[in-house]
Image: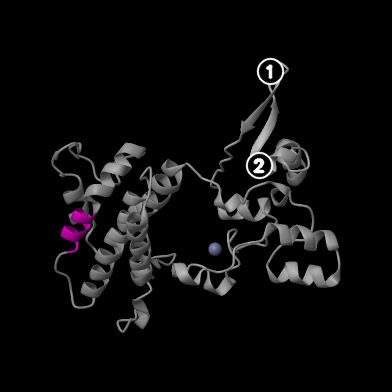
């Protein structure tokens, strides 16, 4: 059903319907009845992982962009060692072949057999620009980060201190004076999120001062990991990138992965990864 709907919506963009699409120009029928040669700039929308699996005909819990093995998902992959990208032409050929061997090969890539509309578009879906920083970065990453810090401070019995510092942030340049703590703000908007990302590290660092010998490595780890995410978030919205800014983003990503264990907050109270000797001080 999903693919049938997609086929109806996206069919005008296919090679079959528009042979001129190979030169990235389309003949588009306009409201005045004339055809105009247009260069379509196709963009995409970032969906949640389960939605991607359905849209791309993939099995659950796999990467839609590359053929990363399931057990390596979430690991840092240096640019020179990227996994092979998903080859939609190959998937389309294998699916059309409809043989046992072809089916086995599709299965080994965690791809379902059958027609998928995205395999027939003159573009690589995963490479299309996805222009929604508000939801992916601010309401996705930053919101998750804030929630995590809140629970982290609670478990480390630093919440009062954290609330006191974050709600007394003075006006500085264009930052708005803060009078409410994280809990007291019912809904954060994009501007508030962006402002928060500029003072969050200072608040966390001050809230996590001192601490017992067991707390110190945990606090240090959080203080290393948080700026990596914030830096990633600050470079990502640049309107253009060069080798230097891309390398800064890559460094931030790498740094985040070095300390990401601190984010392994388990469900339920007092179940941080380092508890019960699970915290690996030798990391
Ligand atoms: Zn991937």
> Is residue 19 one of those drawn in magenta?
no
Res. 73 visible in picture: yes
Q: Earlier in the sequence, mark 1 or mark 2?
A: 2
Q: Distance of mark 1 from mark 2, alpha carbons?
A: 24 Å
User: Quadrant of the rendered structure where residue 159 is?
Assistant: bottom left
Part of the protein shown in magenta: 201-208
Which residue does the numbered mark 1 point to in the structure image? 31
Q: Is residue 270 visible?
A: no
Q: In the drawing, what numbered circle is on residue 154? A: none
Q: Position of residue 282 (x, y in %)?
A: 31, 84
Q: Secondary structure at mark 1?
A: loop
Q: Are marks 1 and 2 in contact (CB under 8 Å)?
A: no
What secondary structure is marked by label 2? helix
On the image, the x and y values in percent for residue 141 come to 40, 52
Q: Characterize the local packing of mark 1: few (<14), some (14-19) or many (20 or more) Cα atoms within 10 angstroms.
A: few
- The quarter in which the N terminus is drawn is top right
The residue at which mark 2 appears reads as 23
């Amino acid at each position: 059903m999903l693919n049938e709907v997609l086929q109806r919506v996206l069919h005008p963009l296919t090679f079959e319907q528009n042979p001129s699409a190979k030169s990235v120009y389309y003949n588009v029928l306009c409201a005045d009845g004339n055809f105009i040669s247009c260069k379509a700039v196709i963009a995409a929308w970032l969906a949640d992982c389960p939605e991607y699996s359905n849209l791309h005909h993939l099995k659950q819990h796999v990467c839609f962009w590359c053929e990363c093995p399931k057990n390596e998902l979430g690991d840092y992959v240096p640019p020179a060692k990227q996994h092979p990208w998903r080859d939609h032409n190959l998937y389309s050929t294998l699916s059309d072949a409809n043989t046992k061997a072809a089916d086995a090969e599709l299965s080994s890539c965690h791809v379902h057999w059958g027609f998928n509309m995205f395999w027939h578009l003159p573009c690589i879906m995963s490479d299309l620009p996805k222009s929604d920083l508000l939801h992916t970065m601010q309401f996705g990453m930053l919101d998750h980060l804030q929630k995590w810090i809140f629970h982290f401070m609670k478990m480390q019995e630093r919440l009062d201190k954290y609330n006191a510092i974050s709600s007394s942030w003075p006006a500085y340049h264009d930052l708005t004076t803060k009078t409410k703590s994280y809990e007291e703000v019912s809904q954060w908007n994009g501007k508030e999120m962006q402002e928060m990302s500029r003072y969050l590290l200072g608040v966390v660092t001050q809230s996590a001062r001192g601490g017992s010998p067991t707390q110190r490595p945990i606090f240090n780890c959080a203080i290393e990991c948080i700026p990596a995410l914030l830096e990633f978030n600050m470079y990502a919205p640049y309107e253009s990138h060069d080798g230097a800014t891309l390398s800064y983003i890559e460094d931030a990503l790498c740094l985040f992965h070095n300390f990401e264990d601190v984010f392994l907050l388990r469900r339920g109270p007092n179940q941080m990864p380092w508890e019960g000797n699970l915290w690996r001080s030798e990391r």
